[in-house]
Image (cartoon, rainbow, N blue to C red):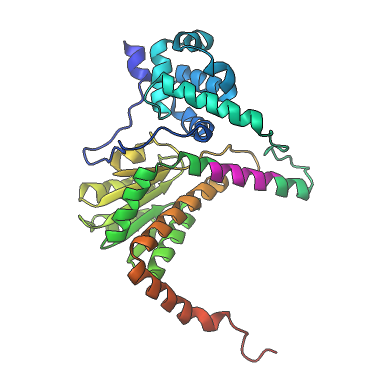
Amino acid sequence: MTDEVKETFVRASGDRRATGGGSAPPAPAALAAKVRTLAPSMTRSMQRVAEAVAGDPAGCAALTVTGLAELTGTSEATVVRTARLLGYPGYRDLRLALAGLAAQQQSGRAPAITTDIAVDDPIADVVAKLAYDEQQTLADTAAGLDTVQLGAAVAALAAARRTDVYGIGASGLVAQDLTQKLLRIGLIAHAHSDPHLAVTNAVQLRAGDVALAITHSGSTGDVIEPLRAAFERGATTIAVTGRPDGPVTQYADHVLTTSTSRESELRPAAMSSRTSQLLVVDCLFVGVAQRTYESAAPALAASYEALAHRHGPLRGRP
């Protein structure tokens, strides 16, 4: 019984957490992305099941729940829990997705390149490998993004009196990107990369405000602390993270999951994660701009006009 409890995926949350109960099971194309995103947070037995279905979707689609449990050396309960963690109501739905994924793989072709970059790779190979990795990261993030949670986050941002965004390091750059976008459509937004300023601002938030934390690992203390302060004071909280079971989600009303790209020596996680974070930020911004179009369009036009002279030829130059 203890092992079963340990294997059960429970995402810690407050009573205010939106459950996203209306979300549909992920499409076959999203299955591989979901496995890559969630595998690091799974128990070892669940990882064996996930790796099996991602590695051989056609073979696993032909197996019963008992057959897959025997193949992976786990239990039927573990197989069912893994299916549910991946977003499917039960194993039968997972088998259908596996069959669909197998069909897609058979009709397509395998990538011609790998993202492993060697220190002596020609620059042309580096460009090709990075481009492929960026494309895969964006595709995985889009496939795994919960649009119910995204819609709820957009609604909160559009109606917010004020928005605070927290991020450290590379995530801090993404936080700045979101806030400057919101400012240009007339919304009040602040980015905080200094943990002290983040907390002192967070304690001033209240219901009607939004606090958004960006952390690839989901465990960055300097980001979690201000989000917790905002959560406890009634602000609507949003987490953009690569770990949907990470500590940051305990204080998030809405969780937006990014792709967890494979880290390498020459391309650390901070670089690869920023790509998926920027996609989520763009989705949030466009969604907010749509909801506030009547005020956003004039504000954006005014900002363009105010900066137009800075983009013209320099004075005194031919």
Residue 52 vs residue 226, the one in the foreground: 52
Q: Give coordinates of residue 173: x percent, y percent.
A: 48, 57
Q: In which quarter of the image is the C terminus?
A: bottom right
Judge from the rendering whether residue 197 lies leftward or rightward of residue 104; answer left or right: left
Residue projecting furthest to the bottom:
316
Q: Residue at x 34, y 54 (%)?
A: 154
Q: Which residue is drawn at 65% across and 28% down?
A: 106
Residue 169 vs residue 80, the one in the foreground: 80
Q: Residue at x 54, y 28 (%)?
A: 100
Dominant secondary-structure state across the stretch colored magenta: helix
Q: Give coordinates of residue 287: x percent, y percent.
A: 39, 57
Q: In this view, does 35 lie above or below 283?
A: above
The answer to whether one can see residue 232 in this image is yes
Q: Give coordinates of residue 176: x percent, y percent.
A: 44, 60
Q: Which residue is drawn at 59% across and 42% down?
A: 136
Q: Give coordinates of residue 109: x percent, y percent.
A: 69, 34
The answer to whether one can see residue 169 in this image is no
The residue range painted magenta reads 129-139
**In which image quadrant can residue 296 be found?**
bottom left
Q: In this view, does 138 lie above or below 262?
A: below
Find out whether residue 247 is within the magenta segment.
no
Judge from the rendering whether residue 262 lies leftward or rightward of residue 115; answer left or right: left
Give the mark count.
0
Q: In which quarter of the image is the N terminus?
A: top left
Residue 169 vs residue 182, the one in the foreground: 182
